[in-house]
Amino acid sequence: MNSKQYSRVYEPNLHLKLGMKIWIQMFAELIQHRELIWRLFLRNLLATYQQSLLGYLWIMITPLVAIGTFVLLNRIGILNIGQTDVPYPLFALLGLTTWQLLSTGIVAGSNSLTSAGALISKINFPREVLIVATMAQTIFEFLIKFLFILILCGVFKYMPPPGIVYFPLAIVPIFILTIGLSLIFSLINGIFRDTANILNLMMTFSLFLTPVLYPVPADKIYYFRLNPLTALVNAPRDLLVYGHIQQPMDFLISTGISFLIFLLAWRVFHLVETKIPERL
């Protein structure tokens, strides 16, 4: 344990104050509790996979089943996916891996407070820690899937362009958006416990409205550009397929929206976190 302890000077209604001081305080609290975040991440990871029959293989089973279903429907003529610039399994896995960072993260994040009710009532710590620990597990699963994508590139003898080095930067906006939405929906779930079920339905519906498993038809691109998630899902895939982002302005706009949602959500969460134990 680090001998250096973080000291906090008490100020009345500190959480209500605006300006840079409160943001510095919020970041400092997260850094102070980094060991707790790590321990919660390990606990969640082991609880999810340790007693599972297939263990960590479940990380890949769900996306592979979804992709296999689309491939089957396309081959028997029920669904026309269209042409892709890389082998379809690679194209679909790229999109689904990015999408599941959002969908899995939001659903898991929305449950993070209610599933830790006993911990919240006994220990005083920033409640954001629970959201961040949940997102750490989502990132871990994302990295496993990305390694599989690189293996799949070798299987299909596909050499990604040099632009793939920017792939981690292209993931940041959707990661930030996921944390922001998780902060808000975790609060709502504390009041309405069926929020996670509604989110599951919403994410399933949104999956088909966003070009995750299919390319954007040329004559329908305008409608897809109205969906801010389109740019966030396509940008990482564009880097691996083309080496550059095809719609950079759309990506910048979606990035700005993501950071705005995150900052507003974190501020709201911090304002009401003292009331959380009363709701759990």
Image (spheres, grey):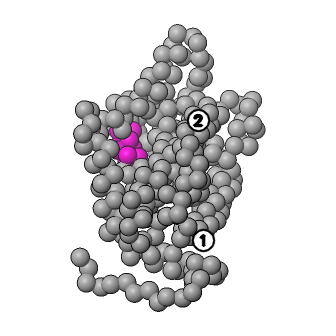
Badge 2 crowding class, 10 Å Cα cut-off, few under 14, some 14 to 19, many 20 or more, is few
Image: 255 above or below 146: below
Q: Residue at x 52, y 51 (%)?
A: 110
Dot placed on the residue nearer the N-terminal end, 1 or 2 = 2
Mark 2: amino acid: Leu
Report helix, strand or loop for mark 2. Answer: helix
Residue 240 seen in the figure: no
In whole angstroms, how far apart are the C-alphas of marks 1 and 2? 29 Å
What x and y, as percent, mark residue 138? 42, 49
Q: Is residue 229 above or below residue 272?
A: above
Quadrant of image for the N terminus: bottom left
Q: Is residue 147 magenta?
A: yes
Is residue 33 highlighted in magenta? no
Residue type highlighted by circle 1: Leu
Q: Is residue 165 above or below residue 98?
A: below
**Which residue does the image show at 59% across and 68% down from the upper left?**
272
Q: Which residues are magenta?
A: 141-149
Q: Position of residue 5 (x, y in %)?
A: 33, 84
Q: Is residue 145 left or right of residue 161?
A: left
> Callout 1: few (<14), some (14-19), or many (20+) C-alpha neighbours within 10 Å?
some
Q: Looking at the picture, how far across and down is residue 47, in whole percent? A: 30, 47
